[in-house]
């Protein structure tokens, strides 16, 4: 990455500015069923190609079988911090329906996941997405149909102090400033590579 830009500099909405993916989650706080419903409702109202609505979710709350099944499917690295989450979800996408292949299924599901993540911020929670999980384990554990693909696991809970991670390297990484490409490297006008004035 060239020339990272730290934190948000232009006044974006608070929900966007405050969203992040912490690994330090509060193991003492529960995520309530009502909060989960609002997160899912936010996902439900995301745009999708032709209103195909391919996003699906498996939802586990701390202590239930679904939570245990999702936790077991995570990579060891992700399990080492995500076990503190109040809820563990998997976002899946319906690749094919009765009309055939669903166009933009993954894209539409990503939009639903971001809606969910922003609603989490509004609830005082964080939603940390993880590619690091075994999709086949999820398929087997939850009897997922073949036309449905597990895309990301999502750890949900209130953020905690970085110290809960224990390992000094992890604490340091958690506290490191977040960086992004500068706008000049991702938005062009007139011709490819020409930044906005
Ligand atoms: C599709 C996707 C997969 C990700 N997989 C993981 C993962 O397996 N483990 C992890 O700790 N973070 C994972 N992340 C979180 C990213 O590392 C994080 O979003 C990125 O570093 C930007 O940080 P921020 O979300 O705090 O802005 C993933 C994020 C996305 C969108």
Image: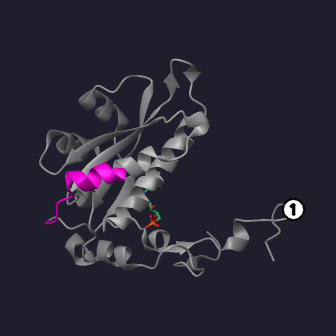
Classify residue 115 by image quadrant.
bottom left
Left or right: where does residue 129 sit relative to residue 140?
right
Q: Position of residue 85 (x, y in %)?
A: 23, 58
Ligand 1 resides in the quarter of the picture at: bottom left
Image: 18 above or below 110: below
Q: Classify 10 Å Cα crowding around label 1: few (below 14), some (14-19), many (20 and above).
A: few
Q: Position of residue 52 (x, y in %)?
A: 54, 33
Q: Position of residue 155 (x, y in %)?
A: 30, 55
Q: Is residue 65 above or below residue 187?
A: above
Kindly identify the residue that appears in the image at 65 percent across and 74 percent down: 182
For the record, the magenta segment spans 28-39
Is 74 colored magenta in this rendering?
no
State the residue at coordinates (17%, 60%).
Answer: 30
Question: In the image, what residue occupies the spot 53% across and 74% down?
Answer: 179
Q: As drawn, is 192 to the left or to the right of 178?
A: right
**Which residue has dot 1 on it?**
191
**How far across and how far down the image is residue 7, in percent?**
51, 79
Rendered view: 171 above or below 52: below
Q: Quadrant of residue 25?
A: bottom left
Q: Is residue 75 visible?
A: no
Q: Residue furthest right?
A: 190
* Along the viewing direction, whichever of 82 and 115 lies nearer the viewer: 115
Magenta span contains residue 36:
yes
Which type of secondary structure does the marked residue at label 1 adopt? loop
Figure quadrant of residue 68: top left
191 to the left or right of 137: right
């Amino acid at each position: 990455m060239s020339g990272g830009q730290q934190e948000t500099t232009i006044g974006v909405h608070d929900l966007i500015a405050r969203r992040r993916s912490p690994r330090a989650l509060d193991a003492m706080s529960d995520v309530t069923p009502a909060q989960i419903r609002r997160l899912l409702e936010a996902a439900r109202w995301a745009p999708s190609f032709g209103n195909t609505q391919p996003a699906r979710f498996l939802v586990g709350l701390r202590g239930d079988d679904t939570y245990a099944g999702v936790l077991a499917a995570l990579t060891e690295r992700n399990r080492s911090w995500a076990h503190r989450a109040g809820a563990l979800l998997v976002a899946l996408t319906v690749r094919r329906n009765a009309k055939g292949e669903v166009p933009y299924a993954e894209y539409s599901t990503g939009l639903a996941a971001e809606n969910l993540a922003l609603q989490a911020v509004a609830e005082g929670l964080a939603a940390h997405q993880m590619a690091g999980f075994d999709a086949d384990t999820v398929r087997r554990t939850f009897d997922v149909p073949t036309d449905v693909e597990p895309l990301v696991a999502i750890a949900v809970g209130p953020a905690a102090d970085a110290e809960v991670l224990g390992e000094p390297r992890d604490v340091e990484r958690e506290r490191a400033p977040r960086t992004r490409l500068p706008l000049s490297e991702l938005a062009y006008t007139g011709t490819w590579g020409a930044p906005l004035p």
